[in-house]
Amino acid sequence: MFRKGIVIFYDEKSAKGLIELKNDHQQVVFKLEDFSNQTVLPQLGERIKCVVLEQNGEVLAKFIVRLDHKNYVTDPNR
């Protein structure tokens, strides 16, 4: 089940960050590789939806979909 949230922290060096889930204000860790569109770096306050999983005792966001940029396409001709 997808859950909605907001990016509250992103570290470009480690390509990791935090998402705060909308309904329960739980904070979950994400990796840039879990975004469907990795060409645009996550922005603070960006709205997303994701699947939340527990792996090795850590709560992680996976299958992250951008809600603010969902139709964004990288076009080198622009």
Image: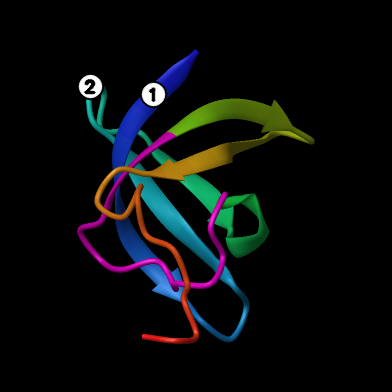
| Element assignment for label 2 | loop
Residue 40 or 2: which is nearer the viewer?
A: 40
Check if residue 43 falls in the magenta segment. yes
Left or right: 47 with respect to 36?
Answer: left
Q: Position of residue 60 (x, y in %)?
A: 59, 39
The front one of 22 and 43 is 43
C-alpha distance separating marks 2 and 1: 8 Å
Q: Tags 2 and 1 in contact by the CB under 8 Å rule?
A: yes
Q: Earlier in the sequence, mark 2 or mark 1?
A: 1
Q: Position of residue 77 (x, y in %)?
A: 45, 86
Q: Is residue 34 above or below residue 50?
A: below
Q: Which residues are magenta?
A: 36-49
Residue under pointer 1: 3
Residue type at numbered disc 2: Asn
Residue placed furthest toward the front? 77
Q: Which residue is mark 2?
A: 23
Q: Quadrant of residue 4?
A: top left
**Marks 2 and 1: which is nearer the front?**
1
Q: Quadrant of residue 32?
A: bottom right
Q: Main secondary structure of the magenta part?
A: loop
Identify whether 33 is placed above or below 70: below
